[in-house]
Image (cartoon, grey):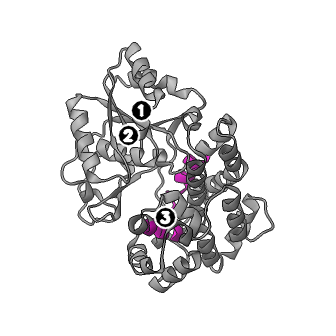
Amino acid sequence: MQAASYNYPTRMIFGPGSRAQLGALLKAEGKRRPLIVTDRGIAGLPFVAEMVDTLKSEGLEAAVYSEIQGNPDKPQVTQGVDAFRAHQADSFIILGGGAALDVGKVIALMINHPGDVFDYEDGNPDVPPVDKEIPFNICVPTTAGTGSEVGRSSVISDEKHVKRIIFDARMMPPLVVADPELTVGLPAGVTAATGVDALSHSVEAFLAKGYHPMADGIALEGIRLVKENLATAVKEPTNIVARGNMLMASSMGATAFQKGLGVTHSCAHALSAVCDLHHGTAIALMLPACMRFNAVALPERMVRLQAAVDTTMAFDVWLEQFNAELGLPSGLAAVGVKEEHLAALVEIAVKDVCHSCNERAVSAEDFEALFREAL
Ligand SMILES: [Zn+2]
């Protein structure tokens, strides 16, 4: 029997309209001055102004930091720490998609911890101790994909645009408010791509090395929820049941991937670094080829994935059909990836930490073959 280290579960307030509870939840912790961390796109939406007004009417003084755009990087973190100090904030509401949640979690970490953000990178042998207070934070996701609200890590890009994973068990937010009403404005393309990312988290976690039956169980139900709800969320954006089930499936995927991810995420991280592809799009394009690669090593697990989506097709074939139904592109060439990118893609994918959890070992030659197959 293998040893394991779990952090389950996160306290979560779930449901349409649940954002109305934010003020009461902060006050219950004795907090009065939250900093709302969000991205530039979200900051202009009516629900942010509404949130600030509602908090004010409840006696809380909220400020907004919204300098997050594109891939999360170190300056966004440093400026956020400054904004927290300038507001004399005592807590965070971290609001947005994966980028905003990732940056917000690292800002919270860096308020009382010394040194450079990248000192806290996963795998650094000299990582400083995370033993000081991390200010109380509530994560409020506005996309259904990354599930960063229940995760213990954040992805932050360095100066060379390489995505580095900042990790500590204490980075897991203490409280999540998951309100599906905040996701109804997502465009169809983003809904589809982020939804397939959520699916991939459950799939890769289920196939990852290691003993974790709790993760496996959550992953299989997460996969079923995506299969049953994603196409509806894409076609009927205001369908709150489909939106709610996707938001839940997203949290479940990220809860499951405490077990680990796999080869698909290493490929996707390389595609984002080299070709600036959206993470979910990269995942959708790589997933079928990566599942063919994994099926050789894990035939029994593939049968269980087929059962989770209730198909008699091979799982990789089902994935291709699902991508098409969602209107996602097929083939990396269609999104501008070229033969000349292959060397750089392989170099970054090999160094990426995710494929260390893949049951079947992945060599540089394997990565090249996978990118070629997906072209
Ligand atoms: Zn992902």
The answer to whether residue 131 is visible is no
Task: Name the amino acid type tagged 1.
Answer: Gly
Residue 78 at what x, y percent from top left?
Answer: 23, 46
Magenta residues? 249-271
What residue is shown with label 1?
Answer: 44
Q: CA distance from mark 3 to mark 1?
A: 47 Å
Query: What is the quadrant of the C terminus in the image?
Result: bottom right
Indicate whether 199 appears above or below 18.
below
| Direction from residue 289 to residue 156 in the image, left or right | left
Q: Say which residue appears at 53% left-offset and 68% top-offset.
A: 264
Give the mark, 3 or 1, whose residue is nearer the N terminus.
Answer: 3
Q: Secondary structure at mark 2?
A: helix
Mark 1 and mark 2 in contact? Answer it, CB < 8 Å. Answer: yes
Q: Residue at x 57, y 26 (%)?
A: 17
Would you name the residue on which mark 2 appears?
40
Give x and y (percent) for residue 104. Answer: 35, 43
Front: mark 3 or 1: 1
Of helix, strand and loop, which one carries label 1? loop
Q: CA distance from mark 1 to mark 2?
A: 7 Å
Label 2: few (<14), some (14–19) or many (≥20) C-alpha neighbours in 10 Å? some
Q: Position of residue 201 (x, y in %)?
A: 56, 58
